[in-house]
Amino acid sequence: MKTKRLSLCKIAAILLCGIAAGVSVGKGQVTPKSFEKINIGNYSAVVDAARKGLKEHSPKITIAFTAHSDITDDIEEIAKSVMEDALADTQEATEGDYIRFQYGGYETRYSYVEDGGQFKYTVKLIPYYYTDLEQEAYVSEQIAQIIDSFAFDADTSDYEKVKTVYDYIYKQVAYDRVHQYQETNHLKTTAYAALKYHTAVCQGYSVLLYRMLREVGVDARVITGTGVMDEKSEFHAWNIVRIDGVYYNLDVTWGKALETDQFFLKSDAHFEGHLREDRYNTREFRERYVMSDRDYEIPNP
């Protein structure tokens, strides 16, 4: 019997306003070849455990499986598959995009024991979080109080919910120009910074809006891509929200910066200066999140 301990570092950079970086989005990114080599048991249970670990800010997420050969070259893909599926949209306010955009990747460490031609692997994923549990508790408490103050009831339309949440963030949060280009300052990208300090960059605006709308039953996603304004382009984040069965674009960051409603509930055709990353333009994504072909018709006051 042989035991081997190895470690490989994989810090996946999260997306920051003004800083182009990449985190893949999707499901089942691991190759079929890798799946054929391993016995990971109940894969859905593994993904659920990883998601639970991320929500609870676990310092370490452990995955165990067996293989019939040395598959160390496939560890990265297996880890990536589990983490991507753990970050997939579940319709829960504290999952999906809420975790993805307040998390800075992970380090992968693994070991295996060879016994009778079987390779028993233990993979440990060590995530990097932008907030801690105390800060997340503050976010949950504040959001509950804010939503309670809105006094929504069974007759409140999705449009009214979107407008109310949008207006609240518009009034309460200013753009964080002090820290916007500080690559090591990740707090500015969080809902916590937006609520606690009333400043954030586009990612913080978008994550807060996502969380609040999901809490009141309105479907939303965080969309990332390139923002083009005054012949300048940089990484940008905004949202799509569902009203009456279709989705509309919404950008509270630019709306606040330019003091305009030009970016509120727009179709793709009229959402100027916003170029989605390819991952949000796939056929699968577009079929799941069907965009309206016209701007939302704002009701008269």
Image (cartoon, rainbow, N blue to C red):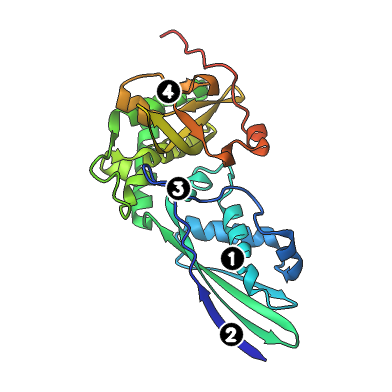
Per the image, the residue denoted by label 1 is 76
How many residues crowd around disc 1 within 10 Å: few (fewer than 14), some, or many (20 or more)?
some
* Along the line of sight, the residue nearer the viewer: 81 or 195: 81
Note whether 191 is above or below 230 in the view shown: below
Q: Which element type, helix, strand or loop, lies under badge 2?
A: strand
**Quadrant holding the C terminus:** top left
Per the image, the residue denoted by label 2 is 4
Question: Given this view, does label 3 or label 1 mark the residue nearer the observer?
Answer: 1
Across and down, in percent, residue 87 comes to 55, 51
| Mark-to-mark CA distance, 1 and 2 | 17 Å
Q: Nearer the N terminus, badge 1 or badge 2?
A: 2
| Mark-to-mark CA distance, 3 and 2 | 34 Å
In the rendered image, the residue lying farthest to the left is 178
Is disc 3 in contact with disc 1, using a CB cutoff of under 8 Å? no
Answer with the quarter of the image where residue 129 lies: bottom left
Is disc 1 in contact with disc 4, using a CB cutoff of under 8 Å? no
How many residues crowd around disc 4 within 10 Å: few (fewer than 14), some, or many (20 or more)?
many
Across and down, in percent, residue 22 comes to 49, 50
Q: Which element type, helix, strand or loop, lies under badge 3?
A: loop
Per the image, the residue denoted by label 4 is 263
Question: Given this view, does label 3 or label 2 mark the residue nearer the observer?
Answer: 2
Is disc 2 in contact with disc 4, using a CB cutoff of under 8 Å? no
**Quadrant holding the N terminus:** bottom right
Disc 3 marks which amino acid? Phe
Disc 2 marks which amino acid? Lys
Disc 4 marks which amino acid? Phe
Q: Which mark is residue 101?
A: 3
Note whether 136 is above or below 229 in the view shown: below
Disc 1 marks which amino acid? Glu
Q: Nearer the N terminus, badge 3 or badge 4?
A: 3
